[in-house]
Amino acid sequence: MWHVLVAGSLFFPGLYVLCSRCARRARPEWTEAECSLISARIVSSIQGILAASSGFIIITSCKDVKFERHWLATWYIWFIIPYMVYDTYVMYVRHWYKCREQRILNGKEHFSRAMNSFIQKDFLMLVHHTVILTILVPIGLFLRQDKGDFFVGCLFIAEMSTPFVSLGKVLIQLNLQNSLLHKVNGAFVLLTFFMCRILLFPFMYSAYGKQYGIPLYKVPLNIPVHCNVINATMLAPQIYWFWLICRKALRLYTNSPLRKDR
Ligand SMILES: *[C@@H]1O[C@H](CO)[C@@H](O)[C@H](O)[C@H]1NC(C)=O
């Protein structure tokens, strides 16, 4: 699987460099932090689309949710490792650029300021990436004993909301936060996030229940405790995130632009 790891290590940073070159050429007035942000958003959208498509292929081809294999399930987990490392690095770089705009001259101070701002402002993302790399990836690659490719596919589907979340951030950056597109996109964020990151869990349980002829509410009693624990641990931050998004959406739809303009 080393070739997948290498492919990912070239693909994601390569795409990022390409996008930021294009951004710099297309919008010379943008700061480096802005170019970096937009490029990172494009790369994560593409990653989201690739992940969700892989997930879709996997779950439609695995009829047996427990034992059936699909090569993409393992393949894409390897592919996501370089992405997570790259994305963490790019998040840090963005803070580094922002600090540079504030003209901090001393190199050591610059590094520690950037690191502080990174840890403070992107803390949740940092934890998210670290947990995926140190816990979920090892489980997905080594500890699940070749079982549950179907459920791995389900988790990839969760990435479907990423392109919409990214587009929202890009629209804000382009000062289009009051546009109709931003509102429509906001609705898609809510919808995809709710369907693919929250309803996904009952869906996995019901898929399991359907295969073994058990009603949904009895499934948690029929699978090992640690499976329930892992699922609950993955679901909890999604609910928290969803709550944050709902709050933002509420502001988006109630804080009408009319009030700002007049
Ligand atoms: C999550 O729940 C499903 C539903 O039955 C289960 O089969 C799966 O193994 C669980 N996932 C993990 C990572 O334990």
Image: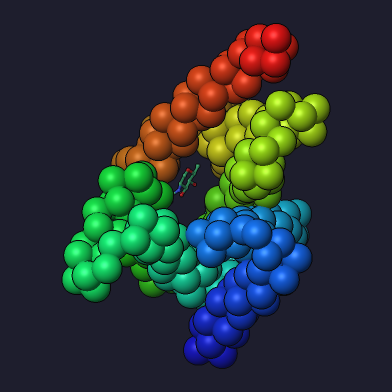
Q: Is residue 39 left or right of residue 222?
A: right
Q: How many marks?
A: 0
The residue nearer to you, when weighing 70 against 32, is 32
Q: Is residue 49 left or right of residue 255?
A: right
Residue 79 is situated, as x and y percent measured from the top left of the image, at 55, 74
The residue nearer to you, when weighing 92 against 23, is 23
Render colour scheme: rainbow
Residue 148 seen in the figure: yes
> Farthest residue toward the right?
180
| Quadrant including the C terminus | top right
Up/down of 155 relative to 249, above or below: below
Residue drawn at x 56%, y 76% is 13
Residue 223 seen in the figure: no
- Quarter of the figure with residue 206: top right
The residue nearer to you, when weighing 117 against 82, is 117
Residue drawn at x 54%, y 24% is 248
Up/down of 57 relative to 236, above or below: below
Residue 167 is situated, as x and y percent measured from the top left of the image, at 68, 45
- Quarter of the figure with residue 102: bottom left
Residue 176 is situated, as x and y percent measured from the top left of the image, at 71, 36
Residue drawn at x 53%, y 81% is 9
Up/down of 10 relative to 255, above or below: below
Residue 224 is situated, as x and y percent measured from the top left of the image, at 35, 45
Q: Is residue 179 left or right of residue 32?
A: right
